[in-house]
């Protein structure tokens, strides 16, 4: 903040700050008691207002400066209008040094107003916004804007209108880019704070989609969140406090965004979230992670949990399809088939994959279903596999299965005929019509 009086008046116009006479109250106006000073004050007050009304801001600042120096407590209007004068002067000036002085003067006017009237809550948000407009591209002054936004939040508890949060995070981004003013953890903390405020605004009926998108773009541009950051910075904190739901949600969201879903820390975050408030998605994704880790029993438990949370046939089909793979990996081929066919029943789009999967289950069962008493019976499972592949429209699977049908000679030797039916036995347990490979 520019609080040093010497600095303030160097900015205002290198004028000394003098209290001239006792103020004389008249309808809120404190005119100097000295008649000559009063006359001049009235003259210059009228002059700067004329210039202000005609938008000749560069001329308005001269008489305004005299009033600020010689009749500083004349009326609060000096400071309200002073902001307009110096903002306008900054816009009309062409010399960069002068523009900078006038911009600084806008903020100094607010400081002087506060010293006299002690009403910072009335205008602090405006001061912060001016600092943003003036200093967002200035490496040396951008922190003034961030400090003023934070001062506004300290006083008001929020930024209003809520679109100011975009400006606030923009200067955070710029201060980070220019000066490395924050650690990555501090940036994340500020980002999450602002997102929380946007959530509150949305709950009250506000449209915050654009503000959220801006924040996400800026955060991505900082390039601080990646898999390594999540693992090394956020991971240890979650391990130390695995019940920290807020942190777990951050880890989960960032991991999804950065495609870091294969890490143990992602699984821990997911467990924390799912244990607090299980949903279909969290339970299913947890199950999929355990599948990746080949912990099929645990995966099955989570998929069963997800099934109880599914609300549509499509969701239920997804889980039955997941369960089919779990059962297959656990060696429960019959259950795997049942789950796959249930998935196909619930979602027609899974039918081809499901029946091809069943065909594969049967094809891989020759050793466990081999009785050794009848080659025709042993090979009959491949006819069942062929039938499953046929439903799937899997020509490659059909060809592979047909190549393992019994031969005409094998049927003749055992007294069977093409077209005769036989039960495959084993877990397959299907009655098939005999056919030969040749």
Image (cartoon, grey):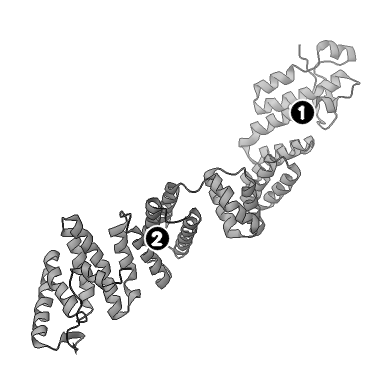
Where residue 433 appears, as percent x and y from the top left, is 79, 22
* Closer to us: 29 or 140: 140
Q: Residue at x 13, y 70 (%)?
A: 62
Label 2 neighbourhood size at 10 Å, few (<14), some (14-19), many (20+)?
Answer: many
Where residue 371 appears, as percent x and y from the top left, is 89, 24
Based on the displayed image, in which of its 4 quarters is residue 14 positioned?
bottom left
* Closer to us: 282 or 372: 282
Label 1 with label 2: CB-CB less than 8 Å: no
Where residue 376 appears, as percent x and y from the top left, is 85, 19
Label 1 neighbourhood size at 10 Å, few (<14), some (14-19), many (20+)?
Answer: many
User: Along the horizontal axis of the image, is 378 left or right of 43?
Assistant: right
- Furthest residue in direction front, as rendered: 6
Q: Residue at x 30, y 76 (%)?
A: 114
Q: Earlier in the sequence, mark 1 or mark 2?
A: 2
Where residue 25 appears, as percent x and y from the top left, is 19, 89
Residue 289 vertical placement versus 41 (above, below): above
Residue 371 vertical placement versus 129 (above, below): above
* Closer to us: 53 or 136: 136
* Res. 311 visible in picture: no
> Which residue in the protein does label 2 denote?
165
Give the foreground label among 1 and 2. 2
Q: Quadrant of the C terminus?
A: top right
Residue 337 vertical placement versus 12 (above, below): above
Based on the displayed image, in which of its 4 quarters is residue 262 positioned?
top right
- Furthest residue in direction right, as rendered: 373
Q: Secondary structure at mark 1?
A: helix
Q: Secondary structure at mark 2?
A: helix
> Which residue in the protein does label 1 denote?
362
CA distance for labels 1 and 2: 60 Å
């Amino acid at each position: 903040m520019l609080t040093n009086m010497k600095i303030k008046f160097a900015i205002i116009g290198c004028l000394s700050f003098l209290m001239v006479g006792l103020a004389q109250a008249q309808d809120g106006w404190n005119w100097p008691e000295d008649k000559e000073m009063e006359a001049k004050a009235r003259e210059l007050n009228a002059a700067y207002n004329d210039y202000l009304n005609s938008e000749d801001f560069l001329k308005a600042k001269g008489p305004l400066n005299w009033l600020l120096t010689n009749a500083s407590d004349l009326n609060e209007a000096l400071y309200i209008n002073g902001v307009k004068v110096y903002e306008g002067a900054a816009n009309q000036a062409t010399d960069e040094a002068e523009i900078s002085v006038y911009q600084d003067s806008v903020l100094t006017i607010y400081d002087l107003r506060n010293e006299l009237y002690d009403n910072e809550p009335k205008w602090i948000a405006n001061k912060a916004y001016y600092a943003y407009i003036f200093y967002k591209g200035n490496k040396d002054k951008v922190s003034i804007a961030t400090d003023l936004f934070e001062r506004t939040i300290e006083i008001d508890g929020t930024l209003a209108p809520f679109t100011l949060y975009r400006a606030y995070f923009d200067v955070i981004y710029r201060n980070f880019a220019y000066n490395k003013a924050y650690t990555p953890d501090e940036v994340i903390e500020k980002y999450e704070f602002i997102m929380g405020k946007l959530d509150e605004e949305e709950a009250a009926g506000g449209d915050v989609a654009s503000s959220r998108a801006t924040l996400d773009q800026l955060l991505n541009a900082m390039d601080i969140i990646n898999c390594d950051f999540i693992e090394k910075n956020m991971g240890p904190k979650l391990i130390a406090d695995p019940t920290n739901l807020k942190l777990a949600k951050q880890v989960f969201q960032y991991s999804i965004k950065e495609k870091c879903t294969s890490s143990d820390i992602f699984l821990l975050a997911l467990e924390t979230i799912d244990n607090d408030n299980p949903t279909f998605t969290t339970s299913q994704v947890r199950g999929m992670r355990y599948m990746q880790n080949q912990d099929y029993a645990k995966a099955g438990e989570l998929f069963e949990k997800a099934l109880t949370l599914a609300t549509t046939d499509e969701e239920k089909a997804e889980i039955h399809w997941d369960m089919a793979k779990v059962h297959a990996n656990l060696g429960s081929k019959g259950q795997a088939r049942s789950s796959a066919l249930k998935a196909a029943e619930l979602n027609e789009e899974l039918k081809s994959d499901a029946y091809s999967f069943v065909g594969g289950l049967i094809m891989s069962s020759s050793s466990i279903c081999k009785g050794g008493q009848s080659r025709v019976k042993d090979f009959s499972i491949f006819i069942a596999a062929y039938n499953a592949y046929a439903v799937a429209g899997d020509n490659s699977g059909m060809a592979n299965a047909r190549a393992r049908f019994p031969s005409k000679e094998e049927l003749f030797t055992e007294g069977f005929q093409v077209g005769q039916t036989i039960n495959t036995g084993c877990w397959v347990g299907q009655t098939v019509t005999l056919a030969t490979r040749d």
